[in-house]
Every structure is written in C-alpha cells, then in structure tokens.
Image (tube, helix red, strand yellow):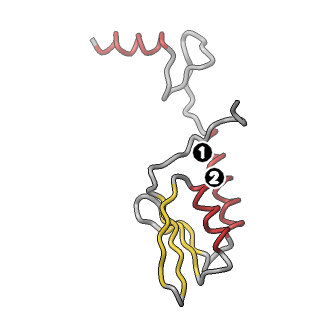
Amino acid sequence: MARGLDPTEEYDGSITVRLLDDETGTEDISCPSYEDAIEVVKENRYSVTAAKIIDRDSNVVFTSAEMEIDDWEAAWRREKRRQSVQVEEYDCPYDSVSCFADDLCVQCKIDTVQEQY
C-alpha cells in the first residue's frame, strides 16, 4: 500500500551534488530528484568544505558557502508549491471541473480537433 502520493518530480540522475573537500578533492553524486540531492547535502554538510547542487542545465542552484541547506530547502518547497497551484484560467463550455487550459476534458479535445479541420 502506498504511503501517500508518489513523487511527481523524478529525474534521470541529471541533478548532481558536488562535494568539495580541501583534503580529498571533489566528488560528484548523481541524484534522481531534488529531495534526494537535499538529503545528500544534509548528510555531508559537516564533513566537506562546501556542497553544491547542480541542475540538469549545469547551473549551480545551491552552494553551502552562501546559504544553509535548511533555508534553501524551505525556499525551494515554497516555490514548488507556488508553481503547482498556478494554473491558467480556462472556462470549460461543458462545465467540467477537470478541464484546464493545459489539460482539456474529452469534449473540449474533440472540439479542438474539429476546429482544426
């Protein structure tokens, strides 16, 4: 039985945690999600000089030299929640409660196809 909702944010290991240590050098760890990357940083934050989270576009989105991981995680969760509730307004002519601009109901999809021909 599931413990709740399955994660909607899974990646193919393209999120990287880079651990920088003055003595041992650099170690890159691939992570399937930001949540896993956050956990890796938390597990290693006191044993390395700096930890970075690098997104799939090779942008550094977090560095421990500039911010605490707990503060960054809280900001990341707020932004993720904010983005998940922003939906373009759409008035379904069939009054379907599950019809959205980016996810039309069956009737609206049919109408869209018919309008194209």
Q: Do the residues labelled 2 and 1 touch (CB within 8 Å)?
A: yes
Give the answer, above or below, for where 11 lies relative to 113: below
Name the kind of residue labelled 2 in the image.
Answer: Glu
| Cα separation between marks 2 and 1 | 6 Å
List x then y, in percent, for residue 105: 51, 16
Residue 78, given in percent of the width and then of the height, sits at 68, 53
Among the 4 quarters of the image, the one containing residue 41: bottom right
Residue 29 at x, y percent in the picture: 50, 66
Q: In this view, does 76 lie to the left or right of 24?
A: right
Within 10 Å of disc 1 (Cα), the crowding (few <14, some 14-19, many 20+) is few
- Position of residue 113 relative to residue 21, above or below, is above
Give the amino acid at mark 1. Gln
Residue labelled with disc 2: 79
Where 46 sits versus 82, above or below? below
53 on left or right of 77: left
Residue 49 appears in which quarter of the rendering?
Answer: bottom right
Q: How many labels does the image show?
A: 2
Q: Where is residue 38 in the image (x, y as percent from the top left)?
A: 62, 62
The residue that appears at 58% across and 80% down in the rendered structure is: 50
* Residue at (46% x, 55% y) in the render: 13
Quarter of the image with the N terminus is top right
| Side of 67 relative to 108 (left or right) | right
Q: Name the residue under label 1.
A: 83
